[in-house]
Image (cartoon, rainbow, N blue to C red):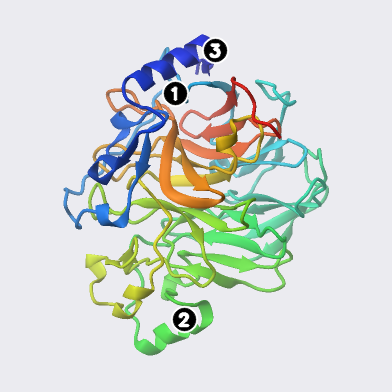
């Protein structure tokens, strides 16, 4: 793949052309216009989808449209807003989650090949000076977290498809200091959603673990009698599933050493693919892949704060009290108990990771923004996703709006050459964005005036 560089005059020219075509930073698309597809994407375009915008179920035919990733076309570059530049930082096989260690080393989960790699780069460097496999031979590594918080972590935690393990670690280590210790031995695995992300609470006392559902809408879950429902909810809270969906479609919580055992933190979240804790408010956030086969524009995926004990609807309801017609009448008791997500994303965009901007390189209005990678649709006829977006926050509180930040990864003919997966803030304040179609990690920097620290 050729090196991707959109900087200086090239970047500004492309971004200027996009802006000239109507993608101004002040544009907010609402109602039906907020849905759209990849052809309507451009840096600076904002969307605000609200529950009242949702169409009825089956308003469109159900047509899959899988993407086959092509090599980066000659001359193609990711598009970013004016004042920013993007360049190819690294090529890595099947990157997924990206997390940056306190010393600046960049940890990348390569889920499909069972390993985690470390990339080392000096502040401002356009390429890593060193790349090394930190650990290999794991079964689906995904989530990565350092503990305790602060400049001197003692462990790096890794979530696999069915466990959470940790390795002794110190700043600058390119391999573990000792063998893995199992923190959580048995997370339900298998089925549709196998990735597990992790994050620590802001006070360091809780370890959050995201666990997606096994099925689309609980079709493998036995019909339960009232006694079974009551038992599940006593153990795991409001809206808890049962059978082979027990302990799934939720966020679990335990202590950092795992000795507190697993508890359910929140239920009814179909597939919380990525988690993060807001550095400003301490809120836990999820980015969630919602259900399939209700139509192109239903239901929206979402990014949201996750409240302890809350129920987000799956499988009986979506985006508030909208009842899934395939499960009509099964849980009328839950209709008024559903928590509506904060930021509704274009349906079937497949959000995978969320990262809060904590650097000081970008302009001040980017501080604390939540960047979300959208892997891209397969279950929507007109493609959505395949981009990086920014959820707009006001003092840590979501407004419901989000903004296209990096686009241009789909050709005019609908061919895909980039599928964003991971996002993290580099030690120098640049933004790192990974995509797993061609194995690229991009570095996005601001070329204007830095914000004050």
Q: Is residue 339 above or below residue 415?
A: below
Q: Residues within 10 Å of mark 3 (few under 14, many from 20)?
A: some
Query: Is residue 186 at least partly visible in the picture?
Result: no
Mark 2–mark 3 distance (CA, rounded to whole Å): 57 Å
Residue 136: x %, y % from top left: 67, 43
Q: Which residue is mark 1?
A: 79
Q: Which residue is mark 3?
A: 8
Residue 246: x %, y % from top left: 47, 72
On screen, residue 364 versus residue 399, left or right, reads: right
On screen, residue 143 versus residue 239, left or right, reads: right
Q: Nearer the viewer, residue 234 or 134?
A: 234
Name the mark nearer the viewer: 1 or 2: 1
Q: Nearer the viewer, residue 148 or 72?
A: 148
Q: Nearer the viewer, residue 69 or 202?
A: 202
Q: Is residue 326 above or below residue 32?
A: below
Which residue is rendered at x = 79% and y = 50% of the image? Answer: 153
Mark 1 or 2, nearer chain start: 1
Q: Which residue is mark 2?
A: 233
Regarding mark 1 in the picture, which secondary structure is present there? Answer: loop
On screen, residue 170 versus residue 260, left or right, reads: right
Q: Are marks 2 and 3 in contact (CB under 8 Å)?
A: no
Which residue is rendered at x = 78% and y = 53% of the image? Answer: 179
Which residue is rendered at x = 44% and y = 75% of the image? Answer: 240
Regarding mark 3 in the picture, which secondary structure is present there? Answer: helix
Q: Is residue 39 above or below residue 295?
A: above
Mark 3–mark 1 distance (CA, rounded to whole Å): 13 Å
Image quarter in which the C terminus is found: top right
Mark 2 or 3, nearer chain start: 3
Regarding mark 2 in the picture, which secondary structure is present there? Answer: helix
Residue 349: x %, y % from top left: 37, 43
């Amino acid at each position: 793949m050729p090196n991707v560089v959109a900087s200086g005059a090239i970047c500004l020219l492309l971004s200027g052309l996009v802006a000239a075509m109507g993608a101004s930073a002040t544009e907010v698309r609402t109602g039906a216009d907020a849905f759209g597809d990849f052809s309507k994407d451009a840096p600076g375009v904002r969307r605000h989808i609200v529950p009242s915008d949702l169409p009825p179920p089956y308003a469109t035919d159900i047509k899959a449209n899988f993407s086959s990733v092509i090599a980066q076309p000659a001359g193609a570059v990711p598009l970013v807003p004016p004042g920013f530049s993007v360049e190819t930082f690294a090529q890595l096989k099947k990157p997924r989650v990206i997390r940056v260690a306190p010393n600046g080393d960049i940890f990348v989960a390569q889920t499909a090949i069972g390993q985690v790699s470390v990339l080392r780069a000096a502040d401002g460097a356009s390429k890593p000076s060193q790349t090394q496999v930190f650990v290999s031979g794991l079964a689906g590594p995904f989530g990565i977290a350092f503990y305790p918080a602060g400049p001197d972590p003692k462990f790096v935690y890794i979530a696999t498809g069915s466990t959470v393990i940790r390795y002794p670690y110190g700043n600058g280590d390119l391999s573990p200091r000792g063998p893995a210790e199992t923190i959580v031995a048995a997370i339900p695995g298998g089925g549709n959603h196998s990735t597990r992300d992790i994050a620590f609470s802001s006070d360091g006392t809780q370890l959050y673990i995201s666990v997606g559902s096994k099925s689309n809408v609980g079709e493998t879950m036995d019909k339960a009698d009232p006694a079974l429902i009551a038992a599940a909810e006593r153990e795991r809270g409001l809206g808890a599933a049962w059978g082979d969906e027990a302990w799934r479609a939720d966020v679990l919580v335990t202590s950092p050493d795992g000795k507190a055992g697993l508890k359910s933190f929140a239920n009814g979240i179909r597939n919380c693919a990525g988690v993060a804790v807001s550095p400003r408010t301490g809120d836990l956030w999820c980015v969630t892949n919602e259900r399939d086969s209700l139509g192109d524009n239903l239901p929206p995926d979402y990014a949201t704060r996750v409240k302890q004990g809350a129920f987000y609807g799956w499988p009986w309801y979506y985006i508030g009290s909208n009842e899934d017609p395939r499960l009509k009448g099964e849980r009328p008791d839950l209709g008024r108990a559903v928590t509506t997500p904060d930021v509704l994303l274009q349906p079937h965009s497949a959000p995978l990771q969320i990262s809060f901007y904590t650097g000081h390189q970008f302009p001040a209005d980017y501080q604390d923004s939540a960047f979300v990678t959208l892997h891209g649709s397969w279950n929507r006829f007109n493609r959505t996703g395949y981009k990086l977006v920014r959820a707009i926050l006001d003092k840590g509180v979501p407004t419901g709006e989000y903004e296209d930040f990096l686009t241009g990864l789909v050709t005019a003919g609908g061919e895909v050459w980039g599928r964003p997966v991971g996002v993290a803030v580099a030690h120098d304040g640049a933004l790192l964005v990974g995509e797993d179609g061609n194995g690229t990690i991009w570095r996005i920097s601001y070329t204007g005036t830095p914000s004050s620290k």
